[in-house]
Image: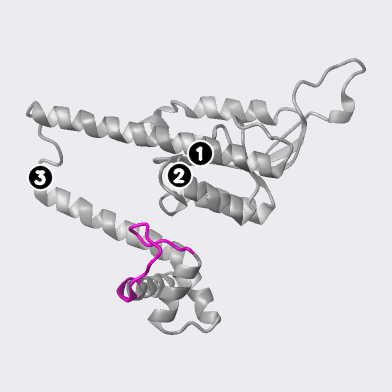
Amino acid sequence: MLQSTNDPTSIAPGEIETLPPHAGKFVAYYRVSTKRQGASGLGLDAQRKVVDDFLNGGTWSLVGEFTESESGKRTDRHRPQLRAALKLCEEEGATLVVAKLDRLTRNLPFLTRILESGQKFVACDIPDMGNPAQTRFMLQLMANVAEYEAALISQRTKDGLAVAKRRGTKLGTPSPKKGAKAGGEFVAKAADELALEVGPILDELEQYGCITLDQLAKGLAARGVKTARGKTTWSLSSVRNIRRRHVDTRQSVG
Protein backbone atom coordinates (compact mmCIF):
# COMPACT_ATOMS: atom_id res chain seq x y z
CA MET A 1 0.00 0.00 0.00
CA LEU A 2 1.45 3.35 -1.04
CA GLN A 3 1.13 6.32 1.25
CA SER A 4 1.84 9.98 0.76
CA THR A 5 4.82 11.37 2.63
CA ASN A 6 3.58 14.91 2.18
CA ASP A 7 2.04 16.74 5.08
CA PRO A 8 0.13 19.87 4.01
CA THR A 9 0.86 21.43 7.41
CA SER A 10 4.62 21.25 6.83
CA ILE A 11 4.75 23.66 3.90
CA ALA A 12 7.48 26.21 4.49
CA PRO A 13 6.54 29.91 4.79
CA GLY A 14 6.30 31.48 1.38
CA GLU A 15 6.14 28.09 -0.40
CA ILE A 16 3.34 27.77 -2.94
CA GLU A 17 1.49 24.47 -3.15
CA THR A 18 0.79 23.89 -6.82
CA LEU A 19 -1.59 20.94 -6.43
CA PRO A 20 -4.59 20.64 -4.11
CA PRO A 21 -3.94 18.17 -1.31
CA HIS A 22 -5.67 14.81 -1.40
CA ALA A 23 -6.75 12.85 1.64
CA GLY A 24 -8.23 9.44 2.30
CA LYS A 25 -8.01 6.10 0.52
CA PHE A 26 -7.76 5.58 -3.23
CA VAL A 27 -7.94 2.58 -5.57
CA ALA A 28 -6.26 3.00 -8.97
CA TYR A 29 -7.62 1.39 -12.13
CA TYR A 30 -5.59 1.22 -15.33
CA ARG A 31 -6.87 -0.05 -18.69
CA VAL A 32 -5.41 -0.77 -22.10
CA SER A 33 -7.38 -1.94 -25.11
CA THR A 34 -5.27 -4.91 -26.16
CA LYS A 35 -3.43 -7.72 -24.37
CA ARG A 36 -0.31 -6.84 -26.36
CA GLN A 37 -0.33 -3.35 -24.84
CA GLY A 38 -0.84 -4.88 -21.41
CA ALA A 39 2.08 -7.27 -21.82
CA SER A 40 4.42 -4.58 -23.11
CA GLY A 41 3.41 -1.98 -20.55
CA LEU A 42 2.63 0.44 -23.38
CA GLY A 43 0.34 3.08 -21.94
CA LEU A 44 0.27 1.63 -18.42
CA ASP A 45 3.39 3.45 -17.21
CA ALA A 46 1.99 6.72 -18.51
CA GLN A 47 -1.31 6.11 -16.68
CA ARG A 48 0.51 5.33 -13.42
CA LYS A 49 2.54 8.54 -13.72
CA VAL A 50 -0.60 10.61 -14.28
CA VAL A 51 -2.24 9.09 -11.19
CA ASP A 52 0.91 9.56 -9.08
CA ASP A 53 1.20 13.20 -10.17
CA PHE A 54 -2.48 13.78 -9.49
CA LEU A 55 -2.31 12.36 -5.96
CA ASN A 56 0.91 14.20 -5.16
CA GLY A 57 0.37 16.31 -2.06
CA GLY A 58 -1.81 15.81 0.99
CA THR A 59 -2.18 12.70 3.12
CA TRP A 60 -3.51 9.74 1.17
CA SER A 61 -3.04 6.02 0.76
CA LEU A 62 -3.31 3.89 -2.38
CA VAL A 63 -4.89 0.70 -1.07
CA GLY A 64 -5.04 -1.15 -4.39
CA GLU A 65 -4.13 -1.07 -8.08
CA PHE A 66 -5.89 -3.01 -10.84
CA THR A 67 -4.92 -3.42 -14.49
CA GLU A 68 -7.11 -4.66 -17.33
CA SER A 69 -6.80 -5.36 -21.05
CA GLU A 70 -10.27 -4.82 -22.45
CA SER A 71 -12.35 -2.50 -24.62
CA GLY A 72 -13.63 0.64 -22.91
CA LYS A 73 -17.04 0.11 -24.51
CA ARG A 74 -17.69 -2.86 -22.26
CA THR A 75 -19.22 -2.59 -18.82
CA ASP A 76 -17.95 -4.23 -15.63
CA ARG A 77 -19.80 -7.41 -16.69
CA HIS A 78 -16.86 -8.17 -18.99
CA ARG A 79 -14.17 -6.51 -16.85
CA PRO A 80 -13.37 -8.55 -13.73
CA GLN A 81 -10.53 -6.24 -12.65
CA LEU A 82 -12.87 -3.26 -12.68
CA ARG A 83 -15.40 -5.22 -10.63
CA ALA A 84 -12.65 -6.06 -8.15
CA ALA A 85 -11.56 -2.42 -7.97
CA LEU A 86 -15.12 -1.23 -7.30
CA LYS A 87 -15.59 -3.93 -4.67
CA LEU A 88 -12.41 -2.88 -2.88
CA CYS A 89 -13.58 0.75 -2.99
CA GLU A 90 -16.82 -0.28 -1.33
CA GLU A 91 -15.04 -2.33 1.34
CA GLU A 92 -12.45 0.34 2.13
CA GLY A 93 -14.61 3.42 1.64
CA ALA A 94 -12.11 4.46 -1.01
CA THR A 95 -12.27 6.64 -4.11
CA LEU A 96 -11.62 5.08 -7.52
CA VAL A 97 -9.01 7.03 -9.49
CA VAL A 98 -8.29 6.72 -13.23
CA ALA A 99 -5.78 8.59 -15.38
CA LYS A 100 -8.40 9.53 -18.00
CA LEU A 101 -12.15 9.12 -18.10
CA ASP A 102 -11.97 6.93 -21.21
CA ARG A 103 -9.73 4.51 -19.28
CA LEU A 104 -12.73 3.87 -17.04
CA THR A 105 -15.35 3.67 -19.78
CA ARG A 106 -16.45 4.80 -23.23
CA ASN A 107 -19.99 3.74 -22.37
CA LEU A 108 -22.25 6.61 -21.24
CA PRO A 109 -25.01 4.45 -19.67
CA PHE A 110 -22.38 2.58 -17.65
CA LEU A 111 -20.86 5.85 -16.42
CA THR A 112 -24.33 7.05 -15.42
CA ARG A 113 -24.86 3.83 -13.46
CA ILE A 114 -21.62 4.43 -11.54
CA LEU A 115 -22.60 8.02 -10.81
CA GLU A 116 -26.03 6.97 -9.57
CA SER A 117 -24.53 4.23 -7.38
CA GLY A 118 -22.86 6.86 -5.22
CA GLN A 119 -19.38 5.38 -5.73
CA LYS A 120 -16.81 8.16 -5.51
CA PHE A 121 -14.34 8.33 -8.37
CA VAL A 122 -12.06 10.88 -9.98
CA ALA A 123 -10.64 11.09 -13.47
CA CYS A 124 -7.37 12.99 -13.52
CA ASP A 125 -8.23 14.70 -16.82
CA ILE A 126 -11.59 16.03 -15.59
CA PRO A 127 -11.41 19.04 -13.26
CA ASP A 128 -13.55 19.17 -10.14
CA MET A 129 -15.95 22.00 -10.88
CA GLY A 130 -16.60 22.57 -7.18
CA ASN A 131 -20.27 21.84 -7.73
CA PRO A 132 -21.56 18.22 -7.89
CA ALA A 133 -24.10 19.03 -10.61
CA GLN A 134 -21.51 20.81 -12.77
CA THR A 135 -18.95 18.04 -12.24
CA ARG A 136 -21.54 15.39 -13.19
CA PHE A 137 -22.42 17.37 -16.34
CA MET A 138 -18.74 17.60 -17.31
CA LEU A 139 -18.21 13.87 -16.76
CA GLN A 140 -21.23 12.95 -18.88
CA LEU A 141 -20.20 15.41 -21.60
CA MET A 142 -16.72 13.90 -21.81
CA ALA A 143 -18.19 10.38 -21.75
CA ASN A 144 -20.31 11.34 -24.76
CA VAL A 145 -17.13 12.41 -26.56
CA ALA A 146 -15.39 9.16 -25.61
CA GLU A 147 -18.38 7.13 -26.82
CA TYR A 148 -18.31 9.02 -30.13
CA GLU A 149 -14.58 8.36 -30.50
CA ALA A 150 -15.17 4.66 -29.86
CA ALA A 151 -17.81 4.61 -32.61
CA LEU A 152 -15.35 6.22 -35.03
CA ILE A 153 -12.66 3.67 -34.16
CA SER A 154 -15.13 0.85 -34.70
CA GLN A 155 -16.19 2.23 -38.08
CA ARG A 156 -12.57 2.64 -39.22
CA THR A 157 -11.90 -0.98 -38.26
CA LYS A 158 -14.92 -2.17 -40.26
CA ASP A 159 -13.88 -0.07 -43.25
CA GLY A 160 -10.35 -1.51 -43.07
CA LEU A 161 -11.67 -5.08 -42.95
CA ALA A 162 -13.93 -4.39 -45.92
CA VAL A 163 -10.97 -3.09 -47.95
CA ALA A 164 -8.89 -6.13 -46.98
CA LYS A 165 -11.72 -8.45 -48.01
CA ARG A 166 -12.04 -6.77 -51.40
CA ARG A 167 -8.31 -7.30 -51.92
CA GLY A 168 -8.77 -11.02 -51.40
CA THR A 169 -7.53 -11.29 -47.82
CA LYS A 170 -9.16 -14.18 -46.00
CA LEU A 171 -10.70 -13.05 -42.73
CA GLY A 172 -11.62 -15.10 -39.70
CA THR A 173 -10.29 -18.41 -38.44
CA PRO A 174 -8.81 -20.80 -41.02
CA SER A 175 -10.35 -23.74 -39.14
CA PRO A 176 -14.18 -23.77 -38.82
CA LYS A 177 -13.91 -26.42 -36.09
CA LYS A 178 -11.59 -24.28 -33.97
CA GLY A 179 -13.74 -21.24 -34.65
CA ALA A 180 -16.88 -23.04 -33.51
CA LYS A 181 -15.15 -24.23 -30.33
CA ALA A 182 -13.86 -20.75 -29.54
CA GLY A 183 -17.32 -19.31 -30.19
CA GLY A 184 -18.91 -21.81 -27.84
CA GLU A 185 -16.39 -21.04 -25.11
CA PHE A 186 -17.01 -17.31 -25.54
CA VAL A 187 -20.79 -17.72 -25.26
CA ALA A 188 -20.43 -19.91 -22.15
CA LYS A 189 -18.10 -17.39 -20.51
CA ALA A 190 -20.47 -14.51 -21.31
CA ALA A 191 -23.38 -16.48 -19.81
CA ASP A 192 -21.37 -17.15 -16.63
CA GLU A 193 -20.48 -13.46 -16.31
CA LEU A 194 -24.13 -12.45 -16.78
CA ALA A 195 -25.24 -14.95 -14.14
CA LEU A 196 -22.57 -13.56 -11.80
CA GLU A 197 -24.03 -10.08 -12.19
CA VAL A 198 -27.76 -10.86 -12.31
CA GLY A 199 -27.86 -13.83 -9.91
CA PRO A 200 -27.58 -11.79 -6.69
CA ILE A 201 -30.34 -9.48 -7.94
CA LEU A 202 -32.60 -12.51 -8.46
CA ASP A 203 -31.85 -13.62 -4.90
CA GLU A 204 -32.86 -10.21 -3.61
CA LEU A 205 -36.06 -10.16 -5.67
CA GLU A 206 -36.99 -13.57 -4.30
CA GLN A 207 -36.52 -12.27 -0.77
CA TYR A 208 -39.09 -9.58 -1.58
CA GLY A 209 -41.59 -12.23 -2.71
CA CYS A 210 -40.92 -12.50 -6.43
CA ILE A 211 -41.24 -16.23 -6.94
CA THR A 212 -42.50 -16.87 -10.46
CA LEU A 213 -40.42 -16.32 -13.58
CA ASP A 214 -42.83 -13.60 -14.68
CA GLN A 215 -42.41 -11.73 -11.40
CA LEU A 216 -38.64 -12.02 -11.61
CA ALA A 217 -38.62 -10.81 -15.21
CA LYS A 218 -40.71 -7.76 -14.28
CA GLY A 219 -38.47 -7.11 -11.29
CA LEU A 220 -35.33 -7.13 -13.43
CA ALA A 221 -36.98 -4.82 -15.96
CA ALA A 222 -38.09 -2.43 -13.20
CA ARG A 223 -34.51 -2.17 -11.98
CA GLY A 224 -33.17 -1.52 -15.46
CA VAL A 225 -31.06 -4.69 -15.51
CA LYS A 226 -30.04 -5.44 -19.08
CA THR A 227 -30.06 -8.78 -20.89
CA ALA A 228 -27.09 -10.16 -22.80
CA ARG A 229 -28.39 -8.26 -25.84
CA GLY A 230 -28.56 -5.00 -23.93
CA LYS A 231 -32.35 -4.92 -23.58
CA THR A 232 -34.37 -4.38 -20.41
CA THR A 233 -37.24 -6.68 -21.40
CA TRP A 234 -36.55 -10.17 -20.06
CA SER A 235 -38.07 -13.32 -21.53
CA LEU A 236 -39.11 -16.07 -19.14
CA SER A 237 -36.61 -18.48 -20.71
CA SER A 238 -33.77 -16.02 -20.17
CA VAL A 239 -34.68 -15.63 -16.49
CA ARG A 240 -34.91 -19.43 -16.14
CA ASN A 241 -31.49 -19.95 -17.71
CA ILE A 242 -29.85 -17.25 -15.61
CA ARG A 243 -31.34 -18.59 -12.39
CA ARG A 244 -30.32 -22.17 -13.23
CA ARG A 245 -26.76 -21.11 -14.05
CA HIS A 246 -26.62 -18.99 -10.87
CA VAL A 247 -27.77 -21.92 -8.73
CA ASP A 248 -25.28 -24.28 -10.40
CA THR A 249 -22.45 -21.82 -9.77
CA ARG A 250 -23.33 -21.51 -6.09
CA GLN A 251 -23.47 -25.28 -5.70
CA SER A 252 -20.12 -25.78 -7.41
CA VAL A 253 -18.51 -23.14 -5.18
CA GLY A 254 -20.16 -24.54 -2.07
Specify whether residue 31 is in view: no
Determine the CA span between mark 2 and mark 1. Answer: 7 Å
- Judged from this view, the residue extending furthest toward the right is 13
| Magenta-tinted stretch | 224-238
- Tell me if mark 2 has few (under 14), some (14-19) or many (20+) residues whose alpha carbon lies within 10 angstroms of its own: many
The location of residue 129, given as percent across then percent down, is 70, 35
Q: Earlier in the sequence, mark 2 or mark 3?
A: 2
Q: Residue flagged by tag 3: what amino acid is it?
A: Ser
Give whichever of 171, 163 is nearer the camera: 163
Residue holding disc 2? 107
In the rendered image, residue 92 lying in the magenta stretch gets the answer no
Give whichever of 85, 237 is nearer the camera: 237
Q: Earlier in the sequence, mark 3 or mark 1?
A: 1
Which element type, helix, strand or loop, lies under badge 3?
Answer: loop
Residue holding disc 1? 143
Q: Residue flagged by tag 1: what amino acid is it?
A: Ala
Q: Is residue 199 above or below residue 10?
A: below
Q: Is mark 2 in CB contact (under 8 Å) with mark 1?
A: yes
